Amino acid sequence: MAKTLTQKILEGHLVAGEYEPGKEIGIRIDQTLTQDATGTMAYLQLEAMGLDKVKTDNSVSFVDHNTIQIGFENADDHRYLQTVAAKYGIDYSRAGNGICHQVHLERFGKPGTTLLGADSHTPTGGGVGQIAIGAGGLDVALAMAGEPFFLTCPRVIKINLTGKLEPWVSAKDVILKILGIFTTKGNVGCVFEYGGAGAETLTVPERATITNMGTECGVTTSIFPSDEETRKFLRAQAREGDWQELTADPGAEYFKVVDINLSELVPMTATPHSPGNISAVKDLEGMEVNQVCVGSCTNSSYRDLMVVAKTLKGKKVHPNVSFILAPGSKQVVDMLARNGALADLIETGVRLEENTCGFCIGNSQSPQTDAVSLRTSNRNFLARSGTKSAQVYLVSPETAAAAVITGKITDPRDLGMPYPKVDTPDEFIIDDSMILSPSDDPRGVEIYRGPNIGAPPANDPLPETVTGVVTIKVGDNTTTDHIIPAGSKMKYRSNVPKYSEFLFEVLDPEFYTRAREIKDSGRHNIIVGGLSYGQGSSREHAALCPMHMGVKAVLTKSFERIHTANLINFGIVPATFKDEGDYDTIDRDDRLEIPDIREKIRRGEPLVVKNITKGVEFEVDCDLSERARDILLAGGMLSYIKTKRDDE
Ligand code: MIC
Ligand code: SF4
């Protein structure tokens, strides 16, 4: 039978279950990545598993998120990460080497392999034909320990590309177009597999922009075939040996096929406050711009920055615009420094940030009140930039560069300039000296632990009955940035009690105090949400901190994939309304009871929720695999593993 590329790679890695879309499967993981904001918790969990060495082919610990280092916390955590990597056989990419996804694509990504990353944009690796999936840190720790990764066998959607991009239209416009078609919700359990003659016209960094931001649609991952273009990129990275040709079989059947003619695309933007609010740049032309930020794991490659540098050469930054640039990696900066493009950029009046996540995560360069900020990143959720009243528009590097010159939202085709097309160079500058190999004498490595690091908190098994209060009711598309902000608070990632104080801060600053009172009175906290709850990042703190605050159940219209897995891993029941209308009957502060919850979960039956305040009852579904049910009943993954080990 003709197979999709996704099926070929997944079947080649199958260790549990059968390849049948919709069913749970377990796959072997070849590579893992973590970053510093998710990494400390993941490695504390890995340490608790008692291994000598990771069991993957290759695991990399990147430092790219918390590099601002106000206070001792981040620097301490980075030292912890460095020592733990040296001891457990993990490569350590030092702060200053670049953003995890960009560096991984350059130096590690390998066609046909599986990559599990503790960051939602791990699918960037799909740009070189990897099955690259984002997950919570605990799942990544388990993969490092050699355990399978469990996921729902995906429905594969083919995105058939035809034509060729016109000048000034680029990969970001392709993925924004796709977001306009698929939106940010309703795509859980799917994979986007790209193909068609149009796919061949895109370079690897362009493909990686597209797979990176497929995450915003909520798909499990996105993947391009591995072809001559992939080979060219790997050769330029001095890794041609990692190449193999990989395509779908002719005649492979897909769940759905969507055709996109690249020749018809125009510059696009995602308007505030969701990557799913798509407009043509033309429709917003003339709006005054206060800030332009180029960078992030979506658009910080050599190709992207060269297009910006060439467009701006000889020009000055508009007086009303603050122009920030954060390159994706040391390799990118090195290339730009040596070919003169960096000097051109400096002449324009750019404000250079370190080659890290930087502005993208809101821990620096927060714009002014009510600012219009154009960013080449992937998320424009409310307050993510650090300024709640700011209006963030997501755009391509080309559209960003145009606004730097004009001070207004401008369709770059209107600049009236020849398009500075940038191809993959024959050779990238290779210098891996910022990637530290593990120690030859792991026993001799002493792990450094600063005072900011606490042990991962433990949970109790699920009670027979949940007796709780609705601590918060939120609407559709609630993201993990709403649940637990990153930005300046992210330095508390290793200190769960402290970090929990910021839960739901953006939506309801009183949440923490209320949740604390409810917990202290011996009752459970319950969260109520709308459609696509838990969109966005992989941060397990969006489940870990609620667990710490005594949240036992989250009732929603629907969930996103990584967040559901994180809730289960931390012993919180994810349940969906059988009848979505029941959402409207609940209010904050309602007292709810969910009797016999253990028994019903064990039997896979709907749960009955009694709203004591309103005097009504309704049903919610908690339709999980047998394994997920066992994890939940044990009170989370760590207790589950412990019970399993005790039984063996
Ligand atoms: C993000 O872009 O939101 C992050 C910060 O990279 C997160 C990970 C985290 O919260 O640490 C992600 O995308 O998973
Ligand atoms: Fe970093 Fe932003 Fe990419 Fe997240 S989306 S990994 S914060 S650059």
Image (cartoon, rainbow, N blue to C red):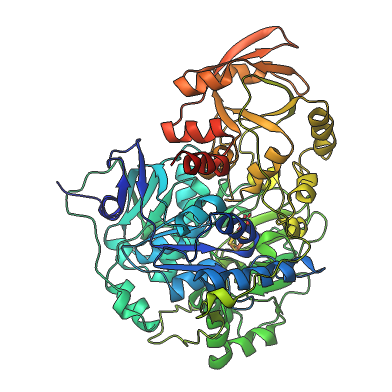
Identify which residue, 186 or 41, lies in the foreground. Answer: 41
Residue 209 in view, yes or no: yes
340, above or below 552, in the image: below
For the point 61% across and 48% down, which residue is it? 540
**Residue occupying the far left of the picture:** 1
Quadrant observed for ligand 2 in the rendered image: bottom right
For the point 45% across and 77% down, which residue is it? 421
Identify which residue, 467 or 582, lies in the foreground. Answer: 467
Viewed as shown, does residue 421 lie left or right of 333? Answer: left
For the point 55% across and 77% down, which residue is it? 305
Could you say where residue 112 lies in the image, as x and y percent from the top left? 31, 63
**Residue occupying the far top of the picture:** 615
585, above or below 556, in the image: above
Viewed as shown, does residue 112 lie left or right of 556? Answer: left
Residue 273 in view, yes or no: no
Quadrant location, the C terminus: top left
Q: Quadrant of residue 25?
A: top left
Q: Quadrant of residue 449?
A: bottom right
Identify which residue, 120 or 293, lies in the foreground. Answer: 120
Could you say where residue 242 lies in the image, as x and y percent from the top left? 32, 74
Number of callouts in the render? 0
Could you say where residue 275 lies in the image, as x and y percent from the top left? 58, 50
